[in-house]
C-alpha cells in the first residue's frame, strides 16, 4: 500500500484481480465453446453489481481458449494497476472445475492462509466467483464437462516483489484477491489483510513471538537484533498500528517487540493508532507536556513549537538510551499499546532518522 497523500476530490473505484480473472475465465470459456472471439463480458460482483470488462486479447482453438484484460484499479495506487490478467480455459475428464497456476501467479508454500499448500494463490472469493460464472455458462450451453482454469498475470513474478507475498509463503507470483470485487481507492484493505495474513502464517508455523515494525527501514535493523527469527516473524504494520494490535489481541501471540520511528511514536503516544499523515498529525502541545513531565525547563520545552518535523526533536533532546524525554515518550506509547493487548509481553524499540535505537520495556 502506497503511503502517498490521498488526492482531494472524488476518487474513481476500480476492480480487483479476482474480478479481472473471473471475467477472463468466463470470456475464454465462451470463446472455447462458440469458437469465436469474445471482446466484452459482463460478470456479477459479490456485492450484487454487474461489471463489464473489455478483453485485451482472445485466442481459441478446439482444445483451449485464453483471454486477458488490463486491470483498472481506479485511483488506487495498486501495484497491479495496468497489469495484464487472464485465464486459459481447457476441458478435463474429472467433471470438476480445477484451478491451475499460470504465469505470474504465486503458489502457496506455508500453512496459515485460506488456501492449501501447493495450490495457486487464488483466494476463496475469486474462486467462488469463477466457479459461479463458469457453472452458469456450462448450464446455459447444456454442457456437462470439467473445466481447467489457468489464471495468469503477465510479469506477475516481478510485480510480486513489490508486495509482501514472499513472507506469507506465496512464492513466484501474485495473489488473485478480492472480497467485494471492487477496489476502493486508498482504503488500505489490501495492506491490512496482508498484516492479518502475516500473523496467521506466523502462528500456523509455530511462531508466537512477533517483531512488528513500520516498514523496511526499521525491519532491516530489527533483523540484525533477531537474526534467529524467520521472515514470517516480522510483521510490517505500516501506518495501521491499531488494526495490527487488534489482530494480535485475538490470537495466542505471547510476546511482541515493536519497532517504531520517532515520527510515528509522537502520534501513537497520544493515542493515534493510524499514523498516516492524512489521518493524524503530531500534537506539539502534547509533546510539550511530555517534555515537561520529563523534567525539562520551559525554555527548552517551548522550542518544540518551532519544530517543523517530529524528527527534529533530537535537536533538543539527544537521542540516547537514558534521555528522560524518550523514556517518557516510550512509556506513553507502551500504555497505549498495552491497553489493546494487555496479556502480551511488549517491548518497544524507538528509532531516529539515523537508525539509532532506544529500548523500552516495563518491568513489574
Image (spheres, grey):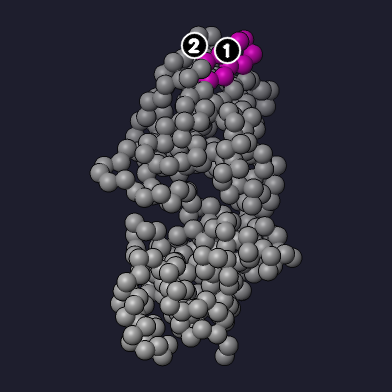
Query: Farthest residue toward the left?
Result: 9
Which range of residues does the magenta coloring cover?
A: 58-67
Query: Farthest residue toward the right?
Result: 228
Splitting the image into 4 quarters, where does residue 16 fall? top left
Q: Which residue is mark 2?
A: 37
Other residues around mark 1 within 10 Å, as few (<14) / some (14–19) / many (≥20): many
Q: Which residue is mark 1?
A: 60
x then y, percent, for residue 64: 62, 16
Q: Residue at x 27, y 46 (%)?
A: 8
Q: Tell me if residue 234 can be seen.
A: no
x then y, percent, for residue 93: 68, 23
Q: How many marks?
A: 2
Q: Is residue 185 above or below residue 294?
A: above
**Camera-nearest residue between 43 and 318:** 318
Q: Are marks 1 and 2 in contact (CB under 8 Å)?
A: yes
Label placed on residue 359: none
Splitting the image into 4 quarters, where does residue 281 fall? bottom left
Q: Residue at x 43, y 51 (%)?
A: 3
Q: Is residue 331 above or below residue 12?
A: below
x then y, percent, for residue 257: 59, 71
Amino acid at each position: 500500500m502506497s503511503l502517498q497523500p490521498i488526492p482531494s476530490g472524488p476518487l474513481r473505484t476500480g476492480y480487483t484481480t479476482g474480478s479481472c480473472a473471473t471475467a477472463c475465465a468466463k470470456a475464454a470459456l465462451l470463446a472455447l465453446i462458440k469458437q469465436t472471439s469474445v471482446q466484452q463480458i459482463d460478470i456479477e460482483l459479490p456485492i450484487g453489481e454487474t461489471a463489464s470488462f473489455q478483453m485485451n486479447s482472445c485466442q481459441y482453438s478446439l482444445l483451449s481458449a485464453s483471454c486477458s484484460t488490463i486491470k483498472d484499479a481506479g485511483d488506487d495506487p495498486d501495484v497491479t494497476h495496468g497489469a495484464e490478467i487472464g485465464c486459459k480455459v481447457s476441458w478435463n475428464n474429472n467433471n470438476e472445475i480445477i484451478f491451475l497456476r499460470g504465469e505470474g501467479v504465486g503458489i502457496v508454500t506455508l500453512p496459515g492462509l485460506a488456501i492449501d499448500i501447493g495450490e495457486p494463490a487464488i483466494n476463496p472469493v475469486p474462486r467462488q466467483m469463477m466457479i459461479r460464472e463458469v457453472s452458469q455458462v456450462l448450464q446455459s450451453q447444456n454442457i456437462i464437462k470439467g473445466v481447467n482454469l489457468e489464471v495468469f498475470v503477465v510479469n506477475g513474478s516481478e510485480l510480486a516483489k513489490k508486495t509482501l507475498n514472499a513472507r506469507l509463503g506465496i512464492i513466484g507470483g501474485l495473489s488473485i484477491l478480492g472480497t467485494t470485487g471492487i477496489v476502493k481507492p486508498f482504503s488500505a484493505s489490501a495492506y491490512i489483510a496482508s498484516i492479518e495474513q502475516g500473523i496467521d502464517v506466523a502462528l500456523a508455523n509455530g511462531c508466537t513471538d512477533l517483531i512488528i515494525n513500520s516498514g523496511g527501514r526499521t525491519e532491516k535493523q530489527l533483523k540484525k537484533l533477531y537474526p534467529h527469527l524467520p521472515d514470517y516473524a516480522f510483521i510490517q504494520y505500516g501506518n495501521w498500528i491499531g488494526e495490527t494490535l487488534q489482530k494480535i489481541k485475538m490470537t495466542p501471540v505471547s510476546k511482541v517487540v515493536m519497532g517504531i520511528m520517532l515520527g510515528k511514536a509522537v502520534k501513537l503516544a497520544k493515542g493515534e493508532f493510524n499514523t498516516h499523515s492524512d489521518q493524524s498529525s503530531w500534537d506539539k502541545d502534547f509533546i510539550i507536556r511530555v517534555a515537561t513531565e520529563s523534567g525539562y525547563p520551559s525554555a527548552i520545552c517551548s522550542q518544540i513549537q518551532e519544530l517543523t518535523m517530529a524528527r527534529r526533536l533530537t535537536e533538543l533532546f539527544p537521542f540516547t538510551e537514558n534521555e528522560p524525554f524518550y523514556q517518557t515518550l516510550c512509556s506513553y506509547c507502551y500504555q497505549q499499546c498495552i491497553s489493546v493487548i494487555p496479556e502480551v509481553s511488549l517491548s518497544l524499540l524507538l528509532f531516529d532518522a539515523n537508525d539509532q535505537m532506544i529500548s523500552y520495556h516495563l518491568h513489574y
